[in-house]
Amino acid sequence: MLRRQGYDGTLTVTDDLDRALDGADFVLIQIRVGGQEARLSDETVPLACGCIGQETTGAGGLGKALRTVPVVLEIAERTRELAASDAWIIDFTNPVGIVTRALLDAGHRALGLCNVAITTQRKIAQLLGIEPERVLIDQVGLNHLSWVRRVPVDGQDVLPELIAEHGQELTRDSGLSRRLVEELRVLPSYYLHYFYEHDQVLAEQLGGVPRAATVAEIERGLLELYRDPNLTEKPALLEQRGGAFYSEAAIGLVGAIAADTGAVHVVDVRNNGTVGGLADDDVVEVPARVDRSGATPLPQPPVAPELLGLIQHVAAYERLALEAALSGDPVVVHKALLAHPLIGQEAPADELVDRLLEAGAKHLPQFPAREGVA
């Protein structure tokens, strides 16, 4: 693939972390602790308690955070020891907001990155028949909990016209109704349908095949294709995997830092007064001007209460989720579950503590051993 593209750099593949980090200027982290087996657990364990099963939000997202935060922090510590002194960590690993907060709390030079904004940009550019570079996605919120409030094209906001003329296309893949988008006058991210269409999503999950099972099958097929040395183009099967445009988002962000361009990218950063109503140390996902010094969030006007209330709710959960992942305290796990709007009830939260810790036991050394768990 690289030869076909005329790539004249060097690609080194290694399973030695220290070798990968040695002298690195940028460290991109995209891992899944526990593999697809753990993802399947994240998507199915909550269903047994009558809660939505999703790998990045709700109870499943908490299960993933508990497994993931300590491992990412270990990688970050080795980065501090072995990489360049001014190295940047770019985190793709979900749940991005919680992981990025963990990295920043530990004093690392880190930014979080998601593909939701770039996917939205590409979709809107296609609808308008223009180059993606002309489209700015001005969104506000948290990772996987954001709303696009403006879509400047060459400096002029076209979101009202987009909603009026392309509302059906914009909502087709989101699971949300056009009426809701027209009423809110914003474009919610795909992940908002877990909140706005909770009961419908839960019913579909209870009667359907977990996404994790589908993804595992896709990955098996992709790995078989990649074994063929004659494969020189990305296989079409990759489009079914999800995570579109991650590579473009990553190269764009790294390039803006390395070349000191000041380009605008949507990233996960400290709030520091950007979104009123949130603590300064919360991690928000907003457009920011990116250069060699990092990311400076663009000013955000006040957030409407129907959006801000949900942001505050989930931000409180994220704070507790990180505390739980670091402390290994089941009581804090319980508090995090109670704080999340997709759970929020004592009975399912009680049951979920046991189920999540049992399901992830071999990847949760920070927690006390559970009775009956090896």
Image (cartoon, grey):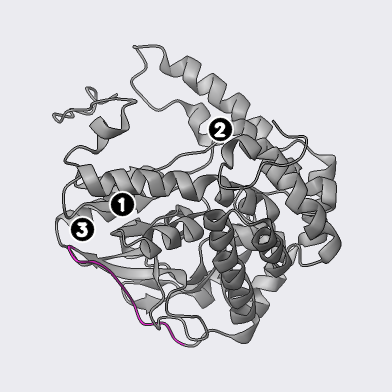
Which stretch appears magenta? 292-301
The residue lying at 27 percent from left, 33 percent from top is: 18
Q: Is residue 170 magenta?
A: no
Marker disc for residue 257: 3
Residue placed under numbered mark 2 in the picture: 35
Q: Are marks 1 and 3 in contact (CB under 8 Å)?
A: no
CA gap, disc 1 to disc 3? 12 Å
206 w.r.t. 37: above or below:
below
Relative to the observer, which residue lies in front, 236 or 306? 306
Query: In the figure, 17 relative to 180: above or below?
Result: above
Could you tell me if the residues under marks 2 and 1 are in contact, i.e. CB atoms within 8 Å?
no
Please give the name of the residue rendered at 16% of the width and 48% of the height, measured from the top-left corner: 84
- Which quarter of the picture shows residue 263? bottom left
Quarter that holds the C terminus: top right
Residue at the spot 49% in from the left edge and 28% down from the top edge? 236
Q: Residue 209 lies in what quarter of the image?
A: top right
Q: Amino acid at mark 2?
A: Gly
Q: Mark 3 is on which residue type?
A: Ile
Compared across the picture, whether 51 is left or right of 299 comes to right
Tell whether position 296 is magenta.
Answer: yes
Expressed as whole percent of the image width and height from the top left, the position of residue 131 reads 33, 56
Q: Position of residue 196 (x, y in %)?
A: 72, 66
Q: Position of residue 349 (x, y in %)?
A: 78, 59
Front residue (pair 38, 186): 38
Residue at numbered disc 1: 89
Can you say whether 218 is above or below 144 in the image?
A: above
Q: Could you tell me which secondary element the residue under label 1 belongs to?
A: strand
**Residue type marked 1:** Ile
- Earlier in the chain: of badge 2 and badge 1, it is 2
Residue 370: x and y, percent? Answer: 72, 42
Give the residue drawn at x 32%, y 64%.
134
Mark-to-mark CA distance, 2 and 1:
22 Å
